[in-house]
Image: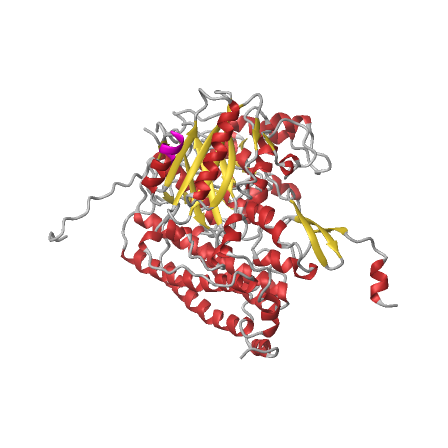
């Protein structure tokens, strides 16, 4: 039925539950409205986290970063010795003003220490924390999520070539 | 005082700058119109508000770094860029990619089509004044974005395809979620139809607006759904099959009239087509057990042999192409992005709006799905 | 018309070698030697006109590549046929020092904006297309055309510090330069790259 009143049938949606969800935020727990956090999906690429004990300071992450957001920052030897870390005493520091959240740095990390978490948002009172995000350092610990959603696994490992060889088609009549 | 007397105090014809901040113009884009009263007598595009120098940037980045950059060329449908660029690399290097990678890529492309078309419906809903359509379409698009998030890790710029395949395999249970969402979408699309197809307001605005013929369309470089709305079944997925489209079974959607209503309907019906294609792909993916990537290189940086290749694919805006030249190094020698809007805006729009009412301008602009990011690049 | 017929027709009519590097792709190059500039231009126009007549209905793109080592620009005219279906890329070499050319906008309307883009990005002048001399996406450009290989964006940024952007890009410029150094084979994990 074509007519001017036809769109009015949309009014019935007034009585249907809205499908918008609440703001996905864990950082504002004081606001009860936002205390219902939305879970990041199982491979979500949120803010970074770096396990300093595993990281070897190789700098692969800073070399691949397409946005040139990663700078290898020197960390005092004592700090690393205390936690029993190996390798060069440098750790990646990320400029979140440039980062594109592409996760290429995660996929080329040979030690698998660099991961991404399910943090949708991240709030701080100091703007410089954002510019010099230092995943793994004490001050930034709270910002790293609890769930490491995008992490390197054999599937996504970019360092190791995974050539695929096409199988010749099975001759008909022969079973598996 | 009668309005007429007020109006004649202006000097007609006059220049009217429409955009770049105008709700009826999609993206940062402007037109300079010469108007005589309500009538447009000349139009000229003013691009450049969104220029990000992608082609130069790509020359200065390694092959693998570029995949984080290219999705940004087309905002509503970023995956076409990822596909075309990576397919061009594979073509130059002569790699054959596993079927599973092809299927997953096709799934991503089809989902991107649905989400871009929902955005189109939303913008058209705004243009004709059916605001529920705008809100519904944007709301439902989010379910597609949720799926993207679970598959690729990001909602809008997925950075998911990579030379040789895709970065990760499909997570467990994702195909079931996709099936559920498709079912939900089908139910919703019925509601859309009731809202829009039967509405006399929408029909009176769109039927007969800015009609084009197939000859006119091809003369002006029109591609994609805008061309199919004139009644010719030209679809690159059929004519130049890429990804897994040669294994899928589908009919090209066409409409006869070539007016704004036909363009709207083609897109509305292609959502149905995409849902059908996704169902076929789900079946194929369930049966397939090849790996998700053919990666003969180590990811930090790799070389692509010397050569050049042009890959064009059917995006929701029209023909989207990447022409990639390699000199055998770590970086592309040159990348050229062929966006459909360069012809649609610069050639078609400047011609078709002449003689139209000013009030219809943004509707015509919207009905052709003018999307400036791929023109500005 | 079928693909083989197209190849044959162009060979017979113009004496040009048509190669088919991939399925549904054809490439033909207007030879640079043995002809005057006028004859080559005429040949290009004739070829484009002829292609339109034999069923290449859609001009997909015009673009340019800067082969700075050979001292030439390579113009690429991409024509697509929906009926054959095939893409024909016509290649035309231009002198890099004096990139003067003629328009094809009277044959192909979409050439209007493509030529405008090529003019702005490479400085190729298309005689007969006044539109192509107008600025396109760049505003007040005061350097050599930016997609030429000898245009250095880092240098440009140093000469044109960003005004009012709220931050100074120069620290990044140094970072960019550092990152532009190509990784060595050892650094990429010993893999020779894709072609090995
Ligand atoms: S995070 Fe990974 S890639 Fe980066 S320095 Fe540490 S070990 Fe190397
Ligand atoms: S996610 Fe991408 S852009 Fe961000 S730091 Fe890692 S490599 Fe760089």
Residue A3, placed above or below residue B68: below
Residue B75, percent across and down? 55, 50
Residue B53, percent across and down? 58, 37
Work out which quarter of the rendered image holds the N terminus of chain B and state it: bottom right
Q: Residue at x 34, y 42 (%)?
A: C3
Whether residue B33 is visible: yes
* Camera-side residue of A35 and A167: A167
Query: Which image quadrant for residue B309?
Result: top left
Q: Residue at x 55, y 33 (%)?
A: B56
Looking at the image, residue A72 sits to the left or right of residue B29; the answer is left
* Residue A24 part of the magenta-drawn span: no
* Camera-side residue of A37 and C13: C13
Write the start and end of the magenta stretch as one range: C10-15
Residue C153, percent across and down? 60, 29
Query: Which image quadrant for residue C97?
Result: top right
* Residue C12 part of the magenta-drawn span: yes
Looking at the image, residue B136 sits to the left or right of residue B34; the answer is left
Work out which quarter of the rendered image holds the C terminus of chain B and state it: top right
How has the structure been colored for display?
Answer: secondary structure
- The secondary structure that dominates the magenta segment is helix
Whether residue A113 is visible: no
């Amino acid at each position: 039925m074509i007519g001017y009143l036809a769109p009015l049938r949309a009014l019935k949606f007034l009585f249907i539950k809205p499908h918008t969800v609440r703001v996905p935020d864990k950082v504002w727990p004081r606001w009860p409205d936002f205390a219902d956090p939305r879970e990041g999906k199982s491979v979500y690429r949120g803010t970074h986290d770096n396990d300093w004990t595993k990281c070897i300071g190789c700098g692969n992450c800073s070399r691949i970063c397409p946005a040139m957001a990663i700078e290898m920052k020197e960390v005092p030897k004592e700090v690393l010795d205390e936690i029993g870390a190996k390798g060069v005493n440098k750790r990646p520091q990320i400029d979140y003003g440039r980062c594109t959240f592409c996760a290429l740095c995660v996929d080329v990390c040979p030690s698998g220490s660099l991961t991404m978490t399910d943090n949708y948002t991240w709030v701080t009172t100091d703007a410089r924390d954002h510019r010099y995000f230092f995943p793994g350092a004490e001050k930034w610990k709270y910002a790293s999520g609890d769930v490491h959603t995008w992490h390197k696994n054999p599937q996504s490992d970019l360092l190791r070539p995974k050539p695929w060889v096409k199988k010749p088609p099975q001759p008909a009549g022969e079973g598996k | 005082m009668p309005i007429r007397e007020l109006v004649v105090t202006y000097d007609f014809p006059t220049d009217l700058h429409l955009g770049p901040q105008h709700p009826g113009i999609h993206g940062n884009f402007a037109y300079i119109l010469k108007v005589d009263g309500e009538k447009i007598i000349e139009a000229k595009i003013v691009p450049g508000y969104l220029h990000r120098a992608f082609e130069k940037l790509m020359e200065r980045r390694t092959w693998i770094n570029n995949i984080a950059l290219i999705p940004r060329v087309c905002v509503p449908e970023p995956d076409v860029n990822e596909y075309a660029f990576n397919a061009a690399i594979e073509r130059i290097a002569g790699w054959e990619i596993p079927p599973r990678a092809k299927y997953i890529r096709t799934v991503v492309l089809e989902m991107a089509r649905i989400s871009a078309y929902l955005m189109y419906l939303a913008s058209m809903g705004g243009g004709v004044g059916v605001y529920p359509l705008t809100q519904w379409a944007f709301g439902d698009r989010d379910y597609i974005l949720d799926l993207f998030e679970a598959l690729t890790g990001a909602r809008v710029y997925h950075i998911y395809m990579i030379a040789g395949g895709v970065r990760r395999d499909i997570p467990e249970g994702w195909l079931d979620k996709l099936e559920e969402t498709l079912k939900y979408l089908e139910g919703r699309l019925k509601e859309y139809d009731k809202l829009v197809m039967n509405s006399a307001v929408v029909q009176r605005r769109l039927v007969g607006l800015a009609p084009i013929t197939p000859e006119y369309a091809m003369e002006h470089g029109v591609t994609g759904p805008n061309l199919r709305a004139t009644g010719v079944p030209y679809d690159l997925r059929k004519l130049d099959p890429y990804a897994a489209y040669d294994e899928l079974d589908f009919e090209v959607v066409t409409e006869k009239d070539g007016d704004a209503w036909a363009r709207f309907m083609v897109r509305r019906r292609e959502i149905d087509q995409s849902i059908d294609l996704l169902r076929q792909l789900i079946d194929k993916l369930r049966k397939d057990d090849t790996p998700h990537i053919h990666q003969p290189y180590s990811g930090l940086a790799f070389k692509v042999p010397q050569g050049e290749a042009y890959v064009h694919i059917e995006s929701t805006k029209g023909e989207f192409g990447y022409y990639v030249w390699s000199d055998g190094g770590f970086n592309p020698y040159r990348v050229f992005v062929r966006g459909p809007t360069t012809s649609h805006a610069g050639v078609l729009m400047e011609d078709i709006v002449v003689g139209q009412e000013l009030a219809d301008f943004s509707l015509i602009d919207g009905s052709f799905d003018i999307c400036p990011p791929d023109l500005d690049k | 018309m079928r693909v083989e017929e197209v190849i044959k027709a162009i060979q017979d009519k113009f004496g040009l070698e048509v190669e088919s590097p991939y399925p549904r792709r054809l490439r033909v190059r207007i030879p640079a030697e043995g002809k005057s500039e006028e004859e080559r231009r005429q040949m290009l126009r004739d070829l484009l006109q002829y292609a339109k007549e034999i069923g290449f209905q859609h001009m997909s793109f015009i673009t340019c590549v800067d082969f700075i080592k050979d001292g030439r620009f390579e113009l690429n005219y991409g024509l697509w046929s929906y009926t054959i279906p095939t893409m024909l890329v016509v290649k035309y070499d231009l002198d890099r020092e004096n990139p003067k050319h003629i328009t094809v906008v009277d044959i192909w309307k979409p050439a209007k904006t493509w030529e405008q883009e090529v003019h702005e990005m490479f400085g190729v002048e298309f005689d007969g297309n006044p539109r192509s001399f107008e600025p396109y996406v760049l505003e007040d450009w005061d350097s050599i055309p930016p997609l030429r290989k000898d245009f250095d964006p880092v240098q440009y940024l140093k000469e044109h510090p960003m005004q009012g952007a709220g931050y100074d890009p120069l620290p990044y410029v140094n970072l960019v330069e550092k990152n532009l150094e190509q990784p060595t084979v050892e650094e990429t994990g010993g893999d020779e790259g894709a072609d090995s």
